[in-house]
Amino acid sequence: MEKTDANLSHPYVQLTTSTISLTNRWDHFLARVGYKRSKHRVEPGLYRLGNPTMDSPVFTSCNYTLSFDDLRSALAGIDCYIFVLNTQGINVWCSAGKAAEKVKKKESGEGTFSTDELVHRIEVASLQDVVRHRVIILPQLSAPGVCVHEVRKRTGFKVEFGPVLAADLPEYLKTRRATPEMRRIRFPLRDRLTLIPIELVGSFPIMLIGAAVLFFLSGFMASMAAIAAILAGVVLFPILLPWIPTQDFSSKGFILGGLVAIPFARMSFLSNQNSMLWLKVGGVLPYLLTMPSVTAFIALNFTGATTFTSKTGVKREIYTYFPFMAWMFVIGIVLAIMLSLI
């Protein structure tokens, strides 16, 4: 029996639009600040956008709402299908990386952006009955988790990797080839700024408690120093990341934390004008030791949210710098306590 466009009534095809509603935007805001972080999900399955035919392209996304909404809004005015995999509400890149880890352990990749999950969803949705062609377009950042020849062998569908950004898809569709610019992964200021809210919300309780404890132990300036060190790591670091010298995130954090500590060290030195030199120097050291170590520790946390690092590089940084962070912080705290008792 010849396939016709009547197959748009296929029971597994759901309807979506390219319109981002206020409800969607509220969901995006909650996701950005980390509220119910794992709950921002779209139902997995096959969606139609516009009025696609059996020859319309099929794009693939994860079921994280921000990723799905970014894709469908970028495809405004294009009749197509969007194939949503179940990635447990995790974005494409992270989920594909998780899938690659599962492959190494010889575990099933279902529930991640993987070959197994893609094959499973193609079978569940009976995609071969919805489209006449046998091509499915995946985001470039899903490549670590998907074995192209395995997908074709198991389903008959050819995998194409589209550009990095969904915004480039309309241009990509004109030639079905991604330019070098489309393949390039960037991490501009706008992307770095989106990391700040969730990190700020996550660090706020620790910052508040630390500032309160230091206020009662060492006074107002020590309390403000704790807040400054944390804000330097959470806010200033992602903004200034490309311009801070050195390659390692930890050393970048030490530099930034050291610069932020200088005003506090100076104020401490000047406030002890009538004290002996060793007390002046002793009052400076807690700031120069604790603040850089705190900022560097927070900076290290950003290695998992950028395009600048690798897994082996992160491990090397942890083993290289973490002992220095710990010793500097502990020595600084001990000095501060000893000075408060004098």
Image: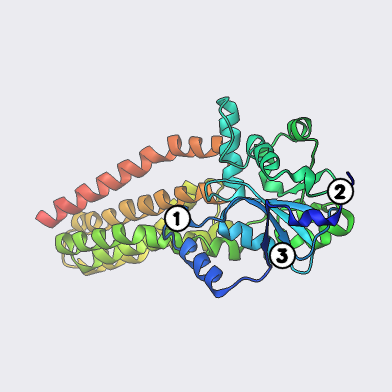
In what element is the residue under mark 2? loop
Residue density around tag 2, few if under 14, some if 14–19, many if 20 or more, within 10 Å: few
Residue linked to disc 1: 37
Specify whether 322 is left or right of 70: left
Relative height, residue 44 to residue 235 (above, below): above
Mark carried by residue 3: 2
Q: Amino acid at mark 3?
A: Ala
Residue linked to disc 3: 74
Mark 1 vs mark 2: give the one in front. 2
The numbered mark, 2 or 3, whose residue comes first in the sequence reads 2
Q: Mark 1 to mark 2: distance in Å?
A: 42 Å
Image x and y of residue 201, in percent: 39, 62
Q: Mark 2 to mark 3: distance in Å?
A: 29 Å
Mark 2 vs mark 3: give the one in front. 2
Which quadrant of the structure image shows residue 127? top right
Specify whether 286 is left or right of 76: left
| Nearer the observer, 271 or 208 | 208
| Nearer the observer, 53 or 18 | 53
